[in-house]
Image (spheres, rainbow, N blue to C red):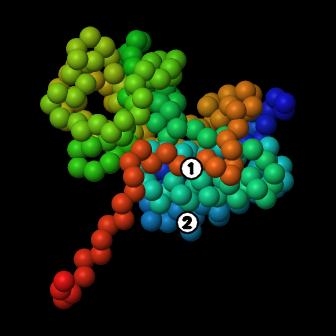
Amino acid sequence: MKEEPILLHIETATEVCSVALTRGDTLLGVCEGRDGNSHSKNLLPYIDHVLKEAGLNPCDLDAVSVSIGPGSYTGLRIGVSTAKSFAYTLEIPVLTVSTLESLAQGALQHLPSDIDDFQIVPMIDARRMEVFAARYDRQLQLLDEVAPVIVDDESYRDLLADQTVVFCGNGMPKCKELLARSSNARFADFELSARYLLPSALHKWQQQDFANVAYFEPFYLKEYVPAKPNVKGLHA
């Protein structure tokens, strides 16, 4: 097993479209933008950019890692289908990483400076006051499984009573005012990035924990229901 694999990382679960390239635990390059409607247009050019910037070709890749959700249905489909295309074309494995685990990794790099003992609750924006959330300890061991959470006055009250909790992710801002009522609530304000896939992806590479390219799917958490078009002037 190659000790310093060259990995391509794809993050499209939210409004951020991000690509990173790494060799071992070294970041070679990142290309990203924040426009949720342009993932299909931007993803391949971003990949081409990071490869060229590093002086590498697609055939130099050892594996591709991809954020598999929860998150945007369309964004996840684009990221996963692109990862599968690279895997089939180049005959390389795919490493799948939970979007919330990736956010928790990012939080470790953006922690408020005044905390020592803490837990991390990453949040992906859903609808209204709902988020997709999980809970991790400081070693990123999963404490609560990924689940939809409606944030209100009671949310996380028991946890925050005697525990510092770092909240992060694009679902955090709309909940911040409620959560900040507790002095134990802390907030890590940063955007999701493909660079945060690296620790988990590298661990999976070392464990040879590869996805089944033919069968793995994005983790939507909820069934996707397309909106009905609002067409005026039609009657039943």
- The image position of residue 28, as x and y in percent, is 71, 43
User: Most extreme residue toward the left, as rendered?
Assistant: 153
Can residue 166 be seen here?
A: yes
Residue identifier under label 2: 40
Q: Classify mark 2: residues with Cα within 10 Å, few (<14), some (14-19) or many (20+).
A: some
Q: Is residue 227 left or right of residue 135?
A: left
Residue identifier under label 1: 217
- Closer-to-camera residue (228/200): 228
- Closer-to-camera residue (147/204): 147
Residue ID at (53%, 58%): 77
- Which of the 4 quarters of the picture holds residue 234? bottom left
Q: Is residue 223 above or below residue 1?
A: below
* Secondary structure of the residue carrying numbered label 2: helix
- The image position of residue 136, as x and y in percent, is 44, 23
Residue ID at (32%, 17%): 164
Instruction: Residue type at mark 2: give it.
Output: Ser
Residue ID at (73%, 27%): 207
- Closer-to-camera residue (204/145): 145
Q: Is residue 167 left or right of residue 192?
A: left
Q: Classify mark 1: residues with Cα within 10 Å, few (<14), some (14-19) or many (20+).
A: some
Can residue 202 be seen here?
A: no
Q: CA distance from mark 1 to mark 2?
A: 18 Å
- The image position of residue 46, as x and y in percent, is 63, 59
Instruction: Residue type at mark 1: give it.
Output: Glu
The residue mark sitting in front, 1 or 2, is 1
User: Most extreme residue toward the bottom, as rendered?
Assistant: 233
